[in-house]
C-alpha cells in the first residue's frame, strides 16, 4: 500500500475510536484490476470500503448516516428546548408585569407581594384567576391585602 495523506484534512476522525484517518492506494497484483483507494484508522485499524477513485474513498469514509441523523435530531431538540425556554421567560415576564400592574392599581399592596413565600405560586394563581374570572381575582386579592394589613 502507498500512503497518500496530502488530503488528510478532508478525512473525519475514526467513528469508532476518534483516531486519525489515513487514505492509502493499494496496488493490486492483477494488472487488470489496477489500483484502489481505501481509508482506514491509524489507531484501531477500522477500514473503509475500497474505491477505484480516491475522492470516492474519502467520501465513503466521511459518510456517517447515523451520526448525521443524530446531529439533525440534536439540532431539532435544541430548537424545541430554546423555544420552551423562550416561552417560560415570556411567562415569567408576563407574571411579573401582571403583579406589578395589580400592585399599581391597588389590588395588591407591595407589602402583600413581599410577604408571599412562593412568588411563582402567587403569580400563577393570580394569572389563572384573572384569565378565568376577573371579579374572583379581585376578591381574592382584596381579601389577601386585608388579611396582611391586619398583621
Image (cartoon, helix red, strand yellow):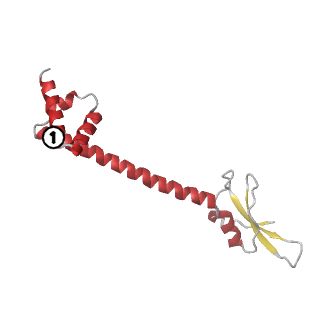
Residue placed most toward the observer, 79 or 42:
79
Residue 28 percent across, percent down from the top left:
85, 71
Residue identifier under label 1: 135
Q: Which residue lies most toward the right here?
A: 30
Whether 133 is drawn above or below 58: the answer is above
Q: Quadrant of the C terminus?
A: top left
Q: Which residue lies most toward the top here?
A: 151
Could you tell me which residue is drawn at 12 percent across and 21 percent down? 150
**Hey, which quadrant is residue 9 in on the image?**
bottom right
Whether 19 is drawn above or below 116: the answer is below
- Please rate how many residues cluster around mark 1, counting C-alpha atoms within 10 Å: few if below 14, some from 14 to 19, many from 20: few
Left or right, 113 with reference to 2: left
Could you tell me which residue is drawn at 39 percent across and 53 percent down? 83
Residue placed most toward the observer, 44 or 93:
93
Left or right, 29 with reference to 10: right
Could you tell me which residue is drawn at 73 percent across and 52 percent down? 43
Whether 140 is drawn above or below 101: the answer is above
Could you tell me which residue is drawn at 81 percent across and 74 percent down? 35
Q: Quadrant of the N terminus?
A: bottom right
Residue 6 percent across, percent down from the top left:
67, 67
Residue placed most toward the observer, 11 or 69:
69
Q: Which residue lies most toward the left here?
A: 106
Q: Secondary structure at mark 1?
A: helix
Residue placed most toward the observer, 147 or 92:
147
Residue 6 at least partly seen:
no
Residue 47 at least partly seen:
yes
Amino acid at each position: 500500500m502507498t500512503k497518500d495523506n496530502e488530503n488528510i484534512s478532508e478525512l473525519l476522525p475514526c467513528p469508532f475510536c476518534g483516531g486519525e484517518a489515513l487514505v492509502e492506494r493499494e496496488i493490486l497484483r492483477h494488472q487488470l484490476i489496477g489500483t484502489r483507494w481505501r481509508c482506514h484508522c491509524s489507531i484501531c485499524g477500522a477500514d473503509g470500503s475500497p474505491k477505484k477513485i480516491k475522492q470516492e474513498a474519502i467520501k465513503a469514509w466521511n459518510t456517517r448516516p447515523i451520526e448525521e441523523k443524530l446531529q439533525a435530531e440534536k439540532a431539532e431538540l435544541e430548537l424545541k428546548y430554546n423555544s420552551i425556554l423562550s416561552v417560560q421567560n415570556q411567562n415569567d415576564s408576563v407574571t411579573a408585569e401582571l403583579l406589578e400592574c395589580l400592585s399599581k392599581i391597588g389590588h395588591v399592596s407591595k407589602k402583600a407581594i413581599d410577604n408571599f413565600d412562593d412568588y411563582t405560586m402567587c403569580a400563577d394563581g393570580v394569572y389563572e384567576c384573572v384569565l378565568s374570572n376577573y371579579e374572583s381575582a379581585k376578591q381574592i386579592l382584596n381579601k389577601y391585602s386585608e388579611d396582611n394589613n391586619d398583621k
